[in-house]
Structures are given as C-alpha cells and as structure tokens.
Image (tube, rainbow, N blue to C red):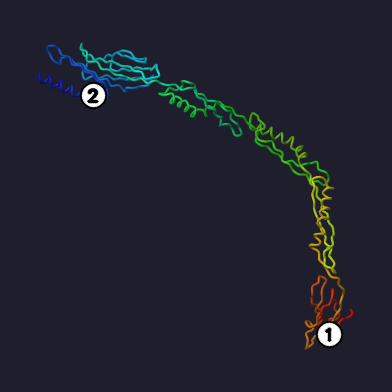
C-alpha cells in the first residue's frame, strides 16, 4: 500500500514540474474503485502552438498523455469567431475566422478517456485577432525604358481595396503602398507607350540675293527639338530635316544681311605749325562698311576720311623751316701736320626741322661742298665758295 502511495506522489510531482517548464494547459484524473486505489487514471497535456492567431489562420493543439491508450475528445465555445467544431483525436487543427473588429475567442474543453474512465477536462483559450484590409491605393509612373529619343507615357498603378490584410488599418495600407513602390514602375514599363519626337536639327544657309559688291552673311535655320513627332526616332528626325532643307534658304534671304565695303583716301597738310614753319602733307585712309548698299559704304568711308584726316595730319605731320643751299670748302690741305682737316674744317647750321647739326667739309682737296640749311650758326677753317 505504501508503495502505491509513493508512486502516486512521484507522478503528481512530475506533472507539477512539467507545468512549470511549459505554458501548455494540462489536466489529469485519478479514479479509484471502492476496492483498489489507482486502478483507473487518465490525463491529458494540451500543447497549443500559440495562444493567439490572426483571423484566417490555423490553430494547432497537440494532445498527449502519460497513459498509453488514453483517447481525447473536445467541445468548444466561440465568441465573435467562426470555424471551430467539436471532435476527437490527438490534435486540434482548425481554421478560425474573426467576424468582428475586436479580438474574438474560442475555448476548447478537452476530456481524456482511458477505457471507461473519463479524466478531468482541461481548457485551452485561443484569441483570434481581427484583420484589416487596405483601402484603394494608386501611384502614377512614367515609362522609362523607351529607346533613345522616346518619351514614356504616364501610367496609373492601382492596388484594389481589400488586397492586403494586416493587424491594423495602417499596416494594411502600408502593405498596399509597398506594392505600389515595388511594382508600379515595372507595370508602367510593361504597359506604357513611347512617343518619339525629333532632336534639334539645324542647317546653315548663305543669303543669295545681295546686290553687286555685297558680301552675304550666313544664317542658321533650326527646327527645335520636340516639335515633330512620328512612329520612330528616325522618322521624326527626317521630318525635321526636310523642313530645314525646304525653308532654310528663304529664311536666310529674309533674315541674313549683305555687307558692302569701301576704302577712301585724302591728303591733308598740317596746319598747326609755329609761325615761320611749313606743315607737311600727310595721306589718310579710312574704311567703312554698310549693310544697306555700296553707295552708303562709300559715303561712310569718305565721311570718315574727312572727319579724321586733318587731325591725323596735325598729329603725324612735320613742321619745317624754309631752306636754301650754302657752299663751303676747307682751308687745310690733306697731310697738314699742324691741323686735321677732317675734324677742324666744319660748318654748324640749322636744318629744316630746326635742329642744329655739324657738317665736316674735309681738306681743301675735297673742293666746294653743298649744305642745305635754314641758317648758318658757325664755321671753322672753311671759306665760302662757288660751285
């Protein structure tokens, strides 16, 4: 008898330890007959994979026992939930749906049976959380995989309402927005269209209707980018090029210009010399151009000559004194031992520009020498002579 009591205590202690180690809900029963203690006992350990699920998920509750041959049956009570049902077996696997916007529950009552003996039932409470579905979300994307020169169309990518379910409205809407971010551009690239417009096309044309003597200018005629469209880039560019070819020359003749050039000259006498001096004559030339006519260019050049010629002469011309011819010869012969006729026989005079200069006549053998001077300043070892 003591041995039986000891075994019962050991079994109870092991059940208490198991309850402490695992959050599973356990139950046990010990039945005795009036004649023999411990001849009938049944127990059950219910291990739920989770105590809380989201609506539409499957609950898994595994049922085990320490007594071979024990069977299990269960009943249920549900609040705000559908999908639970009574049954028997070693596991409860059922899809549970929350039909409200707040948490619902299902309470399973599990009864073990060993032979004709029913053990103490245990309960497992499962919480079923509601799911929220996204509202309609849309995003606009531009097709970006067109060939060079193509412009992609704009496409709207939509995630319908109710596509995603989450534990909150915010999370469901965020899931829909993530769908847009991840797939919107690819959708636009697959379903959008490409429009091709021309690149900028230009041509240079020279005006060809100038008058005689006119030099024509060149003008660039341009068809701006994006003004012509076609089914392909090449076709759009060809349209633009044809417009340049057909209209460029007329544009140049209307908007280009003709340049006429002219050069004119005139002689001007310096007229600002001091009294007694004579101004020199200076030639002055001027160039002019006109975009109107050759006659206008000629008139402009002549006006430039008349406007600048006198000032140029007064700035660049010279003022000279009147001069005449003077004749002198040295008085020392070549080889004179007392004098050096090459340096001792000289005439100092004023030239036409008013500058004093020295003229060396050399020895008497050089004969009568000519000097052009405004006046004679001094002489040494020379005599006037007649050529």
Reply above or below: 250 against 368: above
Question: Is 203 left, or right, of 51 in this rendering?
Answer: right
Check disc 1: other Cα within 10 Å, few if <14, some if 14-19, many if 20+. Answer: some
Check disc 2: other Cα within 10 Å, few if <14, some if 14-19, many if 20+. Answer: some
Q: Residue at x 85, y 83 (%)?
A: 383
Residue lying at the far front in this picture: please name it: 275
Q: Distance between the residues labelled 2 and 1?
A: 157 Å
- How many callouts does the rendering have? 2
The mark found on residue 331 in the picture is 1
Camera-side residue of 38 and 302: 302
* Position of the N terminus by quadrant: top left
Secondary structure under the numbered disc 2 in the rendered image: helix
Q: Do the residues labelled 2 and 1 touch (CB within 8 Å)?
A: no
Camera-side residue of 373 and 190: 373
In the rendered image, which quarter is residue 279 located in?
A: bottom right
Instruction: Give x and y (percent) for residue 311.
Output: 80, 59
Secondary structure under the numbered disc 1 in the rendered image: loop
Instruction: Give x and y (percent) for residue 29.
Output: 20, 16
Instruction: Give x and y (percent) for residue 293.
Output: 83, 46
Camera-side residue of 116 and 120: 120
Foreground tag (2 vs 1): 2
In the picture of the structure, the residue carrying the numbered disc 2 is 19
Reply above or below: 246 against 99: below
The mark found on residue 115 in the picture is none
In the rendered image, which quarter is residue 233 located in?
A: top right
* Position of the C terminus by quadrant: bottom right
Reply above or below: 304 against 361: above
Which label's residue is closer to the chain start, 2 or 1?
2
Camera-side residue of 194 and 269: 269
Instruction: Give x and y (percent) for residue 68.
Output: 21, 17
Residue lying at the far right in this picture: please name it: 386
Residue lying at the far bottom in this picture: please name it: 337
């Amino acid at each position: 008898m003591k041995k039986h009591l000891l075994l019962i205590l050991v079994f109870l202690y092991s059940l208490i330890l198991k309850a402490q180690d695992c959050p599973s809900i356990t139950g046990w029963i010990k039945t005795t007959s009036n004649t023999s203690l411990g001849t009938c006992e049944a127990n059950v350990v219910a291990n739920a994979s989770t105590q809380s699920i989201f609506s539409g998920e499957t609950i898994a509750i595994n049922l085990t026992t320490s007594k071979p041959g024990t069977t299990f049956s269960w009943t249920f009570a549900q609040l705000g939930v559908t999908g639970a049902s009574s049954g028997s077996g070693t596991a409860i696997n059922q899809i549970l749906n929350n039909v409200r916007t707040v948490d619902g529950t299902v309470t399973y009552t599990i009864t073990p049976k060993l032979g004709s003996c029913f053990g103490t039932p245990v309960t497992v409470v499962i919480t079923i959380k509601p799911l929220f579905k996204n509202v309609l979300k849309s995003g606009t994307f531009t097709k970006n995989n067109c060939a060079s020169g193509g412009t992609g169309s704009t496409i709207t990518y939509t995630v319908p309402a109710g596509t995603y379910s989450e534990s909150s409205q915010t999370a469901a809407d965020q899931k829909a927005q993530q769908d847009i971010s991840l797939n919107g551009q690819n959708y636009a690239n697959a379903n959008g269209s490409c429009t091709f417009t021309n690149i900028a096309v230009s041509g240079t044309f020279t005006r060809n209707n100038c008058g005689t003597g006119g030099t024509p200018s060149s003008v660039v005629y341009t068809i701006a980018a994006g003004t012509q469209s076609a089914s392909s880039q090449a076709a759009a560019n060809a349209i633009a090029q044809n417009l340049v070819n057909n209209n460029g020359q007329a544009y140049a003749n209307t908007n280009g210009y003709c340049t006429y050039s002219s050069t004119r000259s005139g002689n001007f006498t310096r007229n600002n010399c001091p009294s007694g001096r004579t101004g020199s004559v200076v030639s002055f030339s001027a160039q002019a151009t006109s975009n109107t006519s050759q006659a206008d260019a000629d008139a402009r050049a002549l006006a430039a000559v008349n406007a600048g010629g006198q000032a140029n002469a007064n700035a660049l011309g010279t003022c000279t004194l009147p001069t005449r011819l003077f004749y002198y010869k040295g008085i020392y012969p070549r080889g004179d031992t007392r004098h050096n006729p090459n340096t001792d026989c000289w005439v100092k005079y004023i030239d036409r520009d008013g500058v004093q200069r020295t003229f060396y006549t050399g020895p008497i053998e050089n004969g009568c020498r000519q000097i052009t001077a405004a006046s004679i300043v001094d002489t040494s070892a020379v005599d006037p002579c007649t050529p």
